[in-house]
Amino acid sequence: MGNFRRNCSRPETKIRDDLVEYLVPRGWLVEITHGNAYQTGFPDLLLAHPRWGQRWVDVKVKGRYSFTKAQKLKWPVWEQHGIGIWILVAATQEEYDKLFGPPNWR
């Protein structure tokens, strides 16, 4: 994966970086999305695995998160088109196991 860590003090960034380090050795391709004016509401990560398929993941801080206006507008439309979004809050087995259940953003 290379040096993907950024110098950023946002708690979500540390969790995201930890998740990348957790997922890559388990066979996942991890693409970090870059939100900008043209991509508001996008989840933080696109995952792909040869066996398990694709997952869109948004990284949040446990117990301290809400959804942006763009996420509240975009994600229901994605859901209507069969695109699931998973919320993960840590690089742990418990969180990892969520990827094998239904999308949990609701």
Image (cartoon, rainbow, N blue to C red):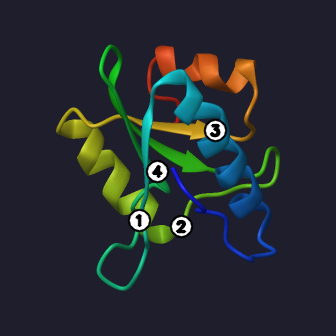
Kind of residue indicated by mark 1: Gly
Q: Which residue is mark 4?
A: 45
Q: Position of residue 46 (x, y in %)?
A: 39, 46
Q: Nearer the viewer, residue 104 or 92?
A: 92
Q: Which residue is mark 1?
A: 41
In three-dimensional space, the C-alpha distance between marks 4 and 3, rounded to whole angstroms, equals 10 Å
Q: Are marks 2 and 1 in contact (CB under 8 Å)?
A: yes
Crowdedness near tag 2: few (<14), some (14–19) or many (≥20) residues, C-alpha within 10 Å? few
Label 2 or label 1, whichever lies nearer to me, is: 1
Kind of residue indicated by mark 2: Thr
Label 3 or label 2, whichever lies nearer to me, is: 3
Kind of residue indicated by mark 3: Leu
**Residue at the image point whose x is 76% and y is 58% from the top:** 14
Quadrant of residue 90 in the image?
top right
N-term-proximal mark, 3 vs 2: 2
Q: Which residue is mark 3?
A: 88
Crowdedness near tag 4: few (<14), some (14–19) or many (≥20) residues, C-alpha within 10 Å? many
In three-dimensional space, the C-alpha distance between marks 2 and 4, rounded to whole angstroms, equals 16 Å
Quadrant of residue 10 in the image?
bottom right
N-term-proximal mark, 2 vs 1: 1
Q: Secondary structure at mark 1?
A: loop
Q: Which residue is mark 2?
A: 68
Q: Position of residue 8 (x, y in %)?
A: 74, 76
Q: Secondary structure at mark 2?
A: loop
Q: Position of residue 9 (x, y in %)?
A: 81, 74
In the displayed structure, 87 sits above or below 103; it is: below
Q: Nearer the viewer, residue 32 or 10?
A: 32
N-term-proximal mark, 2 vs 4: 4
Marks counted in the figure total: 4
